[in-house]
Image (cartoon, coloured by chain):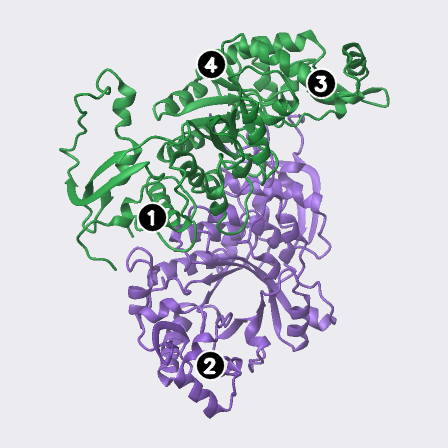
Chain colours: A green, B purple
Amino acid sequence: QRAASGPLLDEISLWPLPQKFQSSAVAFKLSPARFQIVQAKQSSAGPSCSILENAFRLETFSQLVYEDDYGVNNINKTDISDFPRFAHRGILLDSSRHFLPLKVILANLEAMAMNKFNVFHWHIVDDHSFPYMSRTFPELSQKGAYHPFTHVYTPSDVKMVIEFARMRGIRVIPEFDTPGHTESWGNGIKDLLTPCYSDSSPSGAFGPVNPILNSSYDFMTQFFKEISTVFPDAYIHLGGDEVDFSCWESNPDIQRFMVQQGFGTDYSKLESFYIQRLLDIVAATKKGYMVWQEVFDNGVKLKADTQIHVWKGRPQYQDEMAQVTAAGFNALLSTPWYLNRISYGQDWVNIYKADPQNFTGTDAQKKLVIGGEACLWGEYVDATNLTPRLWPRASAVAERLWSDKSVTDVDNAYNRLVQHRCRMVKRGIPAEPLFVGHCRQEYKGL
Amino acid sequence: QRAASGPLLDEISLWPLPQKFQSSAVAFKLSPARFQIVQAKQSSAGPSCSILENAFRLETFSQLVYEDDYGVNNINKTDISDFPRFAHRGILLDSSRHFLPLKVILANLEAMAMNKFNVFHWHIVDDHSFPYMSRTFPELSQKGAYHPFTHVYTPSDVKMVIEFARMRGIRVIPEFDTPGHTESWGNGIKDLLTPCYSDSSPSGAFGPVNPILNSSYDFMTQFFKEISTVFPDAYIHLGGDEVDFSCWESNPDIQRFMVQQGFGTDYSKLESFYIQRLLDIVAATKKGYMVWQEVFDNGVKLKADTQIHVWKGRPQYQDEMAQVTAAGFNALLSTPWYLNRISYGQDWVNIYKADPQNFTGTDAQKKLVIGGEACLWGEYVDATNLTPRLWPRASAVAERLWSDKSVTDVDNAYNRLVQHRCRMVKRGIPAEPLFVGHCRQEYKGL
């Protein structure tokens, strides 16, 4: 039981912790009617920049406000000097294994902003469904979505996601993963996928994108031309992970092509052949690209500004981070942050302890680490359970990517995260509990 | 793609599977305006029995109805002869580790009815909080709940839960667990708990209910007198699990009592001494009782109709079930059904495979198995994540307890459970997905 007066320090638990923070016991009461934010004369914000103006209701300020026992909003005199440790702080959501209704995506963008995430990695399509409605190739979602009308993202849906994110300082990076993970693409586009063979005749099954047909590259050229205009971000994620070679190996046309090209039986060379041409196609749209680590591992020639997304080898990611940065590429970490994987108990602790710069390398290598992403793959997740499964576990990633490297005290983090989680619940995000207890304002009224 | 006409057999997936079931291809269309249920002349239902009358909108019938591609409700001519394999088919919810708002409890009672569960085991209080508002001892929740007004179950809340459950054929069995798991009781009732000692003086901490004071038994007499009238069910769950002896061992008064009684240093004898007196107190209220298995394991003398709740030894429960039934007691299984424990992937399969009669014993022993309960302990669960974590995993328990022993085909169960889960989502229960895919009607409209 605490006294009814005085600052409730446990209620100004900031998350993620700012770089520099100095609070005092001087408390001000806030009046909803008279409160306003004023810029310093030297500020670059103002009527000329609406985003920065809006951003002044930014997250840190709102977290400083606490409600006392009389329901009055208070704020203590505080000086904060803040900046993120890493520039790329992302969340991957998968809208293919299960379709995610727009409101689920928007609610999670809101939660991302509360946690200072700034990248929404939209793994929008995959083997199981193709919900992205393309203007150039409408048959992709017409035949590849779970349902052509109810389980698709229309152009205006996509625009809304991008704008909703932009107003919260969040970039939207779409992923169109090829040549694997493309089963749903094949429903709408004839001859795009490789026909698999069984006993020297087509089995009826299809494999990765067919890398030996010019039509495949013509399609990709048109498709990524559209994508590069629909998504304004400077980067596109091109996937490139988990290509299964068995279908290519079974196909006599592919076998002939391998001989012609002198690839022998090394199908990773064929994969690289495809990826190389795809990267050239996307580079022509003036976009940068992110790829999963296999593309780097296979020795594909990459533009210098390519970002390599490290995801394999759980729980060991150190060697790959060292190799990627030793080769001079930007690296992004996700290996320890596959939040779709769940276990009983407080699994946020291991999530919190992982550090993207925790590998053996030079300072120059460490500087090539641009950040990381928490991934919530969709095999077991849809609108019914996504938000509590993601939050507050993703918040642990948020602090790792934002706060100073020295912020590693798990007990201190626990206490702040409990409060931060209650703040999310209060604002309508059903973040699950860390452990036993309750939130002061979780259920208003009787 | 299926034809637009004809019965959609995948949409009449019954769960749990009835004992006998004969469907035909003869389909009837249902008109909302003209539909009615008529009893056979020999039926005991009718205006004289409102519960049975209401129950005719029972679950199985509603599952037979399917919507065709034109939005018309259909039902095929079907004969069903059904009865449950086990009489006791329960769900345990824990409202102490986290307070569960009334609407969460009611929604889950609705889901229980959809799955033919018939017992709500309400683990209403525990160490962490005491949300039950007692008329006799209001200070229990006043000082023991997380919040005395917002995080409590008032007498009318309790009445509503009982009535809501009754109308769905569900019994409410409250658990008031003693002498352990009682930390929150001590806030409101002076001298109820044992003072722990450190270096021959009280440490300020408290242990289990103090078993050597008459005042403890006087309190229990009054308290369970109230409970026996508030909860109409014939049974009360008295707990009795996980009693920590270290505090009793530290207390000189307890030590002296042990000597007087000739218990030596066997504190399980002291525990049995307490339980024995408690059982006599509750027996005087004319209620039957359920207890956790430790009470049986410790050799406490029990009434013949006592139900022993088996929960320890995951994943091995066979020996305990054999011993309990060999001693002639009714046994209830929960060991394989601790649904609070989660793991990545399709963990419903192991839940589904467990069978309460899977132990070595006589037919007479097998008949003493009255059923089981799925338990969702609350350490990591509250209103934000309870429902998707419980469903459809609890549905796997539901079929095990209802359907014939021979119903064990996991592939067949998967297909029906996917449909059943979609049916729950359609009716507003956010049951999580089993795996990739979608529900036809999960998100109405665009």
Gap between marks 3 and 4, in whole Å? 32 Å
Q: Secondary structure at mark 1?
A: loop
Q: Is A216 on the left-hand or right-hand side of A408?
A: right
Check disc 2 and report the residue beneath it.
B274
Chain holding disc 2: B
Q: Are marks 4 and 1 in contact (CB under 8 Å)?
A: no
Chain holding disc 4: A
Q: Is A157 on the left-hand or right-hand side of A319?
A: left
Check disc 1 and report the residue beneath it.
A442
Picture disc at residue A269: 3
Q: Residue B131: x and y, percent?
A: 36, 61
Q: Residue at the location (28% across, 47% down)? A: A11
What is the quadrant of residue B26 in the picture?
A: top right
Check disc 4 and report the residue beneath it.
A230
Is the same chain shared between marks 4 and 2?
no
Picture disc at residue B404: none
Is the same chain shared between marks 3 and 4?
yes
Gap between marks 2 and 3, in whole Å? 75 Å
Pick the quarter of the image with the N terminus of chain A: bottom left
Q: Secondary structure at mark 2?
A: helix
Against B122, is A222 above or below? Answer: above
Is the same chain shared between marks 4 and 1?
yes
